[in-house]
Amino acid sequence: MAAPTSSSPAVVSDPDSEPAQEAGIASAVASASGSGLPTSGYLPSVIPHDRLGGCVAAHRRLLDLVARVDDDVLRRPCALPGWSVAHLLTHLARNAEAHARMVEAASDGQIADMYPGGQRQRNDDIAAGERIDAATARADLAAAVARLEAAWDATHVDVWRFGAGRVLAYGVTTLADLVFLRWREAEIHTVDLDLADRDGPRWADLDPAYVDVEWEWTVRGLPDRVPPEVTLLLAPGDRPSHSVGRRGERLVVVDDATLPTLAWLTGRVPGRDGWPTLGPWS
């Protein structure tokens, strides 16, 4: 999939021929330029170009890694407790198919469930991949990714604006946020495969653009995860500090850089002594 680029936006020459929201943005940019206000020349869009580009790149890295996996590697445990590499690759394929179904349904004016059978379907789908062989795993994942990227390519701008799917953790979720959630799956689970001996990535290799979006998303969800007696002060030093809780009497300062802090916030590593036990990450 060739994801649209946000660095060279199309010039909207006839506002009446474009979707209303695009014409309105073009008009606003032109107005700002004419008034002498600073402008980058970037035309915002309801289509999440940056997220799409980031996710497609993550898919390519994942598929390249899977090409180096054999049957013995599939039987290995991955970094997720109780999961094998085969389980995780099966999950990544079924997750891509679920995202494709939601995008396709949105194009038909419907809001589809990511997993119509709920958590049980998700769990059963993962378990079904336990004995899959490497060739099947590669073909399965490649086909699922291709279906999802084709669905994104076929989605009209108005569907990007109004379309949504329904996921287990968040309920009704916009298509733009669904792209991020898929990007998260591809980025983090490629690390979770724990295939450094096959030139697989480590946590430090996460795409910086993804890290920026994940940080904002995860920090936004922290109030529901921090114990009520705690005020959490995130002070990574490589980006602005952020306080969470604010009413808790016990102040806990998390003074580590973004990547190790994010590894803790996403449940990939335990926290330091004195850091609170957080609610589940989602």
Image (spheres, helix red, strand yellow):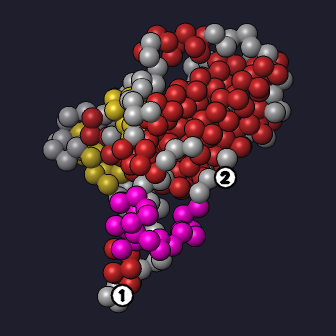
**Which residue position holds label 1?**
34
Residue 151, position in %: x, y? 57, 38
Q: Is residue 125 above or below residue 228?
A: above
What amino acid does circle 2 point to? Ala
Decide if residue 109 is in sight here. yes
**Which residue position holds label 2?**
2
Residue 266 left/right relative to 219: right
In three-dimensional space, the C-alpha distance between marks 2 and 1, rounded to whole angstroms, equals: 33 Å
Q: Secondary structure at mark 2?
A: loop
Residue 140 left/right relative to 216: right
Residue 12 left/right relative to 197: left
Q: Residue at x 66, y 41 (%)?
A: 59
- State which quadrant residue 69 falls in: top right
Q: Is residue 230 magenta?
A: no
Q: Residue at x 77, y 27 (%)?
A: 138
Q: Is residue 22 magenta?
A: yes
Q: Where are the magenta residues, as a range?
A: 5-27
How would you rate the neighbour count of disc 1 (Cα within 10 Å): few for under 14, some for 14-19, many for 20 or more? few
